[in-house]
Image (cartoon, rainbow, N blue to C red):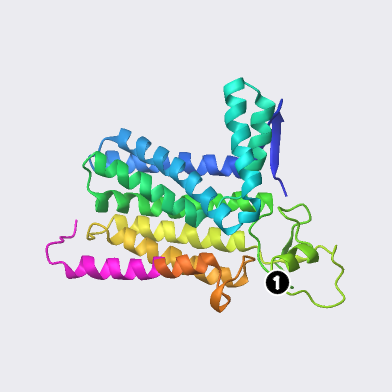
Amino acid sequence: MYPELFSIGPITITSFGTMIVIAFLSCNYLLRKDFIKYGYNPEYADDIIFRAALGGILGAKLYFLIENYTYASENISGLGKILYGLLTLNFQLVSDGIQLFGAGLVFLGGLIGGLILVSHYIYKKSLNWFIVADFVAPLIALGHGIGRIGCLLVGDDYGIPTDLPWGIAFPNGAPPSTAFNIQQMGCPIPEGVSPSAVLTVHPTQIYEMSLYFLIFLFLKYLLTKKHIPGEIFANYLFLAGLARFVVEFIRLNPRYYFDLSGAQYISIIMMILGTVFHYLLRKNKQNEAI
């Protein structure tokens, strides 16, 4: 695993953080191209991506703290360290805070947070929400896929143990894929396995990355065809929700009612919203394909 790429003094450049930056820069570049192509101000694309990044990070962190409330105090103290370190120019304190607050980002929380801030910006600029949502929808899938590469490099968000030839062991993961850690996350371990044994697990990061890249390509293709404004975003909600719902069956996450994870419940909501959204768009005779 490669959780850290290199260090510059007290500042450590992490692989996950690097992939997040690459994701936002890639999405910003592609969104600017689409805005120019369809006659919109490309500066709007910069503002939209900035708000998506800000709302995404805050929403992802909030979701993580809600689902992992025992770590909330530690993470909040990390945020305090970042803010105080910036005010006092104490970069070691900033670095320590990033290590605390930077850990634990949940995409579905980020999606909600990003949508709220981007929707506010669209309303403020009097843009057509449905058209902008169609531009952004493929890029959400692309950014999510790139982010999963970061998860793979860190050794986070892996799945249940497997004997399949492509299973991967994460001895230095976050956390390591030891029998003890996997059991602590609610997955039963066969008798006789040492708690310290490092197990091979499903690389669910790769599964999700592949699915999201396919969704990105499919939605970008739809964008070139005649479609009702909002239809591509509706397709994104359904496809992304379905992809995450399926992968969650073999991914380690806390389980709730009916042995489903929190991410699966949100995925169900996404699929229902996508289906209803698509139906209403098609039913409304005033909507014309563009």
Q: Residues within 10 Å of mark 1 (few under 14, many from 20)?
A: some
Quick check: is 288 in the magenta stretch?
A: yes
The C terminus sits in image quarter: bottom left
Is residue 97 toward the left or the right of residue 209 in the image? right
Q: Residue at x 55, y 75 (%)?
A: 257
Secondary structure beneath disc 1? loop
Q: Main secondary structure of the magenta part?
A: helix
So how many labels did they put on this image? 1
Q: Residue at x 66, y 42 (%)?
A: 100
- Asked if residue 2 can be seen in this view, the reply is yes
Q: Quadrant of residue 87?
A: top right
Is residue 133 toward the left or the right of residue 258 in the image? left
Q: Quadrant of residue 254?
A: bottom right
Q: Residue 275: where, in percent of width, then height?
A: 32, 70
Q: Nearer the viewer, residue 104 or 79?
A: 79
Q: Residue at x 69, y 65 (%)?
A: 185
Is residue 163 toward the left or the right of residue 109 in the image? right
User: Bounds of the magenta span?
Assistant: 270-290
Q: Residue at x 65, y 51 (%)?
A: 71
> Is residue 122 placed above or below 173 in the rendered structure?
above
Q: Residue 50: where, in percent of width, then height?
A: 41, 37
Q: Residue 131: where, in percent of width, then height?
A: 25, 51
Q: Quadrant of residue 273?
A: bottom left
- Asked if residue 15 can be seen in this view, the reply is no
Q: Nearer the viewer, residue 209 or 174?
A: 174
Residue that lies at the very extreme toward the left in this rendered image: 286
What kind of residue is marked 1? Cys
> Is residue 228 placed above or below 23 in the rendered structure?
below
Mark 1 = which residue? 187
> Is residue 256 placed above or below 104 in the rendered structure?
below
Quick check: is 255 in the magenta stretch?
A: no
